[in-house]
Image (spheres, rainbow, N blue to C red):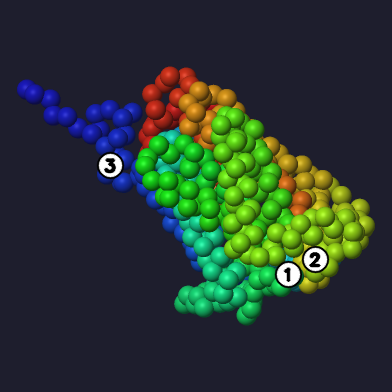
Amino acid sequence: MTAVSSPFADVTDRSWWRQVVGVTDHDTVSYLTVYLALLMFIPASLIFAPLGGSGTPATVYSLLLLLWYLLSWMSGRVTPSGGGRPVRIAMLIFALAVLASFVAGMTRNITQPEVLSAGRGLITIAAWAGLVVVITQSVTSYDRMETLLRRAVIFGSIVAAIGILEFYSGLNLTNYVQIPGLSNNIDYNTLLSRAGFNRPSSTAIDPIEFGVVMSMLLPFALHQAITDSRPGNLRKWLPVGLIAFAIPISVSRSGILTAAVGCLVMVVTWKPRQIRGFIVTGIIGLGALKLAAPGLLGTLFTYFTGLFGPSTGAASVATRTDDYSRNWPYIVQRPWFGRGFETFLPQIYDWTDNMYLKILIEMGIVGLISLLVLYLAGIHCAAAGRRRTQDETRRSLGQAMVASFAVVVVATATFDSLGFPMFAGVFFLILGLAGAYLTIMTRESSSLPTLPVAGGGPVKSE
């Protein structure tokens, strides 16, 4: 009698099951594309009011994505790849530090607004952790990871184009966006301005966030333009031009400084011919900027040369360093675990314009160390993955990740970075992808079969 094959004959082969339930790596990247669209296209000021500042559609979607993944895992429909261990451990350490600061905050004489904000902080950290877990455990294909990053660059170029329109029109275009069920958390009827120039924020909260997010995406745009072998220079370089142009028109020193750092990290690994091309293109770009926005280069030059002196229309370095002396008493009161994540509210206390300082106040020394561990884990995964491959395209992507993390490290010292939803959303997306990148590069370098997609069996990881 001829044996009848059954999908249950070999329980170690779950390809049939992945086809039945439709859980694939392709789907994971599609789900993450929806997350990116919500993060970048819906103005960050629009929230679900009951959740406060943590109620952005992207944050809520990230929580739902984590819930879907956990239910699929518990029901056996998804088997985690086991990848990205360094960033997952770092994320766990940071989350535990947040919980410890929450407990510390609840043991002091705390106001009701601080209690509510601390609760929203727990929602936010769950969304961030969920994003990292889903990406590291589900994105197991280099091509699909590149696809997701290509979409991130395309979306970023659209956000940049909106900002450029705002810069020239003087209109806050996002004020015209109304979505049923969402409330406006921050209402800017007119654009902010500096030295007579409009300061666009596009779909971000603030021009600083807008400029820095563009700086985070610029290394990936450069990587894709340089390594893409397909024809069509306009298609490859238009996103680079839009994103690069959006950075100076934000009239943000943070954006320009971080863009310079990111480009420097990218350039050091390029060939001499590429470096010469970059320098020539940069000079041409400065000339184009001078023609497109007369007076802007002079204004930016003035703001940088007068950085350490009295500043007109912007806070100088001296003003920002005064934050340390003003807020030192809060640090001394609770040096180890802080006053509670997301409880140092500007309406009650003060602005810090420095996320390292804010974390030190809210989460103490333990929290600051956990944040540094988080950053170092991302850099380690990107750099270690790059060292594991000889493929120039894959190495370029690793360096782009390192450059983007360098942007994050610098930006954290120049504004309250993690308090801005678009910045935080993009950062934790890249952090998760860095973990996945290391796993993929490790697998490829060991000459073992390609990692199974989400829903496959257990695999060896780094």
For residue 19, which numbered disc appears in the image? 3
In the rendered structure, are the residues bearing label 1 and label 2 in contact, judged by CB atoms less than 8 Å apart?
Answer: yes
Q: Amino acid at mark 3?
A: Gln
Residue 77 sits above or below residue 112 on the image: above
Q: Amino acid at mark 2?
A: Ala
Residue 238 showing in the rendered view: yes
In the rendered structure, are the residues bearing label 1 and label 3 in contact, judged by CB atoms less than 8 Å apart?
Answer: no
Query: How many other residues sit within 10 Å of disc 2, few (<14), some (14-19) or many (≥20)?
Result: some
Residue 454 showing in the rendered view: no
On-image quarter of the C terminus: top right
Instruction: Left or right? Give the position of 457 relative to 244.
Output: left
- Which residue is outermost to the top? 447
Residue under the point 69% across and 49% down: 258
Query: Regarding mark 1 in the picture, which secondary structure is present there?
Result: strand
Q: Which quadrant holds residue 248?
A: bottom right
Residue under the point 62% across and 80% down: 189
Instruction: Left or right? Give the position of 265 relative to 217.
Output: right
Q: Nearer the viewer, residue 143 or 229?
A: 229
Q: Position of residue 54 (x, y in %)?
A: 61, 64
